[in-house]
Image (spheres, grey):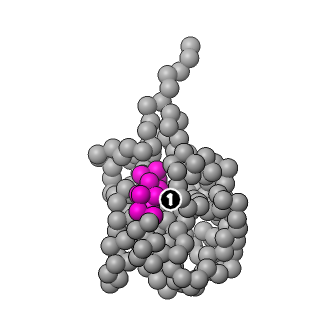
Amino acid sequence: MQSQPSEHDPGKLPADLPAPEDDGAARHLTGLKLPTLALTATDGSEVDLSALTGRTVVYAYPRTGRPGQDLPDGWDAIPGARGCTPQSCSFRDHFAELQRVGVAHLFGLSTQNTEYQREAAARLHLPFPILSDAKFAFAREIRLPTFEVAGMTLLKRMVLVIEDGMIVKLFYPVFPPDRSADEVVAWLRNPV
């Protein structure tokens, strides 16, 4: 007997998603000088966030799904887990606006491998690279918050605004994920 294809559409958010709460796990990040550490990007480059000049925005997310592939059991019930594709599309759709408000570099960040991320970046038509921290070197070094599900350790969703290698603003928790870029643009227009 052949199984039916999954109805999962990673681009759509269910109306009843639970909102994440601030657990304090990212409190130490604002003001942190980033370590010298290269991350592989989907464009084939190696990116050291500590060495970039100007304003950089990095949105970290658990994992992108693929249309037709099932989510881990209980995924939608985990506060903050669902919404990686809508968040990426939010930053894609605001890319030019982010540049106009002074963002020199924009990246997504997950612990998925670069090959998987390349597929997502191409499918979603992202005009910026996604960084892979598949070995958790960056996450461990700066103690990024994580959670576990289905045998995977994944990053909790957050956005880092970095200026000349230092985190100057943290958005954590992020909810709803499809409004993430809107919040970042609003803050960049009026940083408080």
Q: Which residue is mark 1?
A: 61
Q: Residue furthest top?
A: 1
Residue drawn at 44 percent across, 66 percent down: 96
- Front-most of residues 50 and 94: 94
Q: Position of residue 155 (x, y in %)?
A: 53, 61
Which quadrant is the C terminus positioned in?
bottom left
Relative to 37, is 72 on the left or the right? left
Any part of residue 149 in sight: no
Residue drawn at 56 percent across, 85 percent down: 164
Q: Position of residue 161 (x, y in %)?
A: 47, 76
Residue 93: in magenta span: yes
Could you say whether the residue bearing mark 1 is in a helix, strand or loop?
loop
- Front-most of residues 158 and 99: 99
Q: Residue furthest left?
A: 15
Identity, as a three-letter code, of the amino acid under mark 1: Tyr
134 vs 4: above or below: below
Q: Position of residue 13 (x, y in %)?
A: 36, 46
Q: Quadrant of residue 48?
A: bottom right
Neighbor class of circle 1 (other Cα within 10 Å; few <14, some 14-19, many 20+) is: many
Q: Please tell me whether the stretch drawn in magenta is mainly helix, strand or loop.
A: helix
Q: Position of residue 28 (x, y in %)?
A: 49, 80
83 vs 37: above or below: above
User: In the rendered structure, which segment of residues is drawn in magenta?
Assistant: 84-95
Relative to 91, is 45 on the left or the right? right
Which quadrant is the N terminus positioned in?
top right
Residue drawn at 48 percent across, 75 percent down: 103
Residue 113: in magenta span: no
Any part of residue 82 in sight: yes
